[in-house]
Amino acid sequence: MTVTANHPEINSSAMAQLKVVIVGAGIGGLTAALALRQQGHQVTLLESSSFSNEVGAAINIPPYCDGVLKRLGIDLGKDDRIGAIECTGCAIWDGAVGQKIISLDYHAESGRWQHLRRLVHRAHLHTALWEKVVSTEGPGKPCILQLERKVASVDPDQSEVVLANGERVSGDLILGADGVHSQCRKALEGGPGYVPFDSGISAFRFLIPTQILQDDPLTRSMIKSDGSLTVTRRQIVSIYIQPMNPNHIEGKGSEKQLMLLIASEFALPVKAILEKAPEDETRIWPLLDLPELPTWVNGKLALLGDAAHPFLPHRGEGAAQAIEDAVSLGVLFPYGTTVDEVPERLALYQKCRKERATRIQVASRINSQPMEVQRKMGFSPHEFDNYSFSHDEFHHSSHALQKAKSFKKISHWRQPISFGPSPTPYHSGNGSITGGLPGTQPQKIVRSIRFATSKTYLEGLLPTESFSFVLPDTVVQASFIHTSFQNLFWLGGSGYDRVGLYIHGTQYNSPNGEVVPGTFVPILFENLVDAIVSRRDEFGAPVLGCDIETVDDGSSNTVELRWRGTAFGRLCWAQLHRNEISDENGSDALYREAPAKHNPDLGLLTYRYVPAVGKPGMADAEYAVLEPYDKSPLPEGNEDHQAEDASNRVVQLLDDPKKRHVLPGIV
């Protein structure tokens, strides 16, 4: 899937296209060009180099970056030309004595994340992006790539880039992806005062064929140890030396000789690896840093990547954060964005990206310190992965854009607000089982489809930042549940049906600091107005009314959701068997998170929103609601219908104009 929509009018009209000028064609600039091209915009890249010698070693692709690249059509797991490998672990050695300090097994945790942690040669990824950006195939028009175009200055007011040769290039949107020595940064307010400084650390970069290290008994042990960065038979070794300023070393020769001089007292296996470094490919790179910028944007200009936030390499997330910047820009500037909207969208881009990028940038600085210093600071690189990896920038920016559009116009907000303002007034509510007719018992039949899905997507259905998931994992569980209430006294012996989406493993952080774990319900559908109105008024549940039809032939069930004869949803179960519902945990046991992986699930979480009368866009009241599970025992005869094989459970969501503001959020 690409970060785009189907726009048949892209080639026939330029009315909704933006002219985008990107300064710099590194990883970040090319990714931004690809994302914006796929949205249908006209993109021009200005690159100061000739691309004759693109250099670099292996770069880290965290799970969150692997996922967004895949959306852009860069599938690192399938494209053999890129040569990406899965990063299954990491071994840290003390180079002075040649002893392993710690070994981390990343492969054991790979199931927590939707995508894989990978390693890729920077030049190979750069080439893959370059080819897609200028290709005549794929969504959008090929980008214009101009090489050897050195930028002298940028005028954000005129939305213009001035080249060193005096040429002027104008656009509707200017993006500065021109690295740590950015010219575009100088066009920000106060930008000239923010210049990169020497971090005090330098790195030597080179590549050695793994086979050479495997053939040497002295180095073989270091690269074959458990936890090394290994996939199949290929391995990557990283050597990091600090701290010594090379300018203070006298009589230095080549950069390789300088490296060997610095490491002269290291253990023999480490020196043996360094001695195998190619003389003509070994490079020393002073690692530069930059104070946090107060802003990344000015008018129609925005920075991304190292121009905004250069990273020290100790967490290996610099390239990944540049890619996230680019993906965010692609999402926030869909086809149809007007020139007048550019400044506010760039402000939204900064809101989406600046806090996260800065937090990871700070973590990289802490990571550069010796391990004992990190421990004293209470910092754990491995634990920080929970924050870093449990994110999807495509989903995050998509949700932000949806909310920004919703609040920009005056709208009538009502339940369910997870999907934004309702275009037409619907009733909503819930319903509960009550007593049966005299001499009889009420009955409840429950059919459920439980599935694993994306946490970062479901986060967009959580109504406020006070709601979150208990675990950082990006793979979570949710259920579509159909409940049939039958033989109800207040309905003269008849009943009604409910179908809902239940998101397990969530929690609400109350203002007083209390954390309430539960199952969040963003949407319910019911087929009885009385139940809808009653439960909505009492509990503020997010319900829409529709027809719900059930076909039960004994071994299979189909539940169809309809609006005035048009089907918009279908749940199917085949090869069913029936279980008696146990009353051990009460009548609502089927709705809760089980088996528990964390704190007990206390009930169903919803969010009540009451629109103010005569004041569009304002609420009389809005707050979280916890409906505790019903622990009262059930009468006999209540049933749970289950299909053992997952292939026998199917969810189909169809298009319907009456529910169009909700269905895209569920799909």
Image (cartoon, helix red, strand yellow):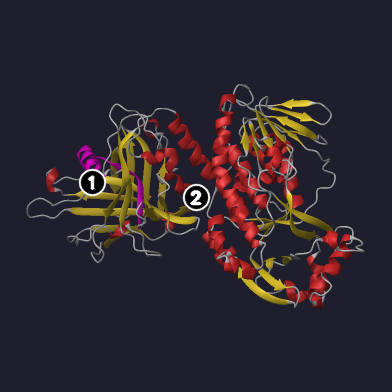
In the image: residue 83, left or right of residue 11:
right
Magenta region includes residue 151 = no
Asked whether residue 414 appears in the rendered view, the answer is: yes
Read off the residue under disc 1: 431
Residue at disc 2, secondary structure: helix
Nearer to us of marks 2 and 1 is 2
The residue nearer to you, when weighing 641 against 626, is 626
The residue nearer to you, when weighing 255 against 71, is 255
The residue nearer to you, when weighing 421 against 349, is 349
Residue pictured at 56% horizontal, 62% vertical:
110
The residue most toward the left is 438
Quarter residue 262 falls in: bottom right
Viewport quadrant of the C terminus = top left
Residue pictured at 33% horizontal, 52% vertical:
556
Residue type at mark 1? Gly
Residue 180 spot, x, y in % from top left: 73, 46
The disc at residue 456 is 2
Asked whether residue 114 appears in the rendered view, the answer is: no
Viewport quadrant of the N terminus = top right
Residue 112 spot, x, y in % from top left: 52, 61
Instruction: Specify the segment rendered in magenta.
Output: 515-539
**Number of other residues with Cα within 10 Å of mark 2, as a class: few under 14, some 14 to 19, many 20 or more:** many
In the image: residue 250, left or right of residue 235:
right
**Number of other residues with Cα within 10 Å of mark 1, as a class: few under 14, some 14 to 19, many 20 or more:** many
Question: What is the number of callouts on the image?
Answer: 2
Q: Earlier in the sequence, mark 2 or mark 1?
A: 1
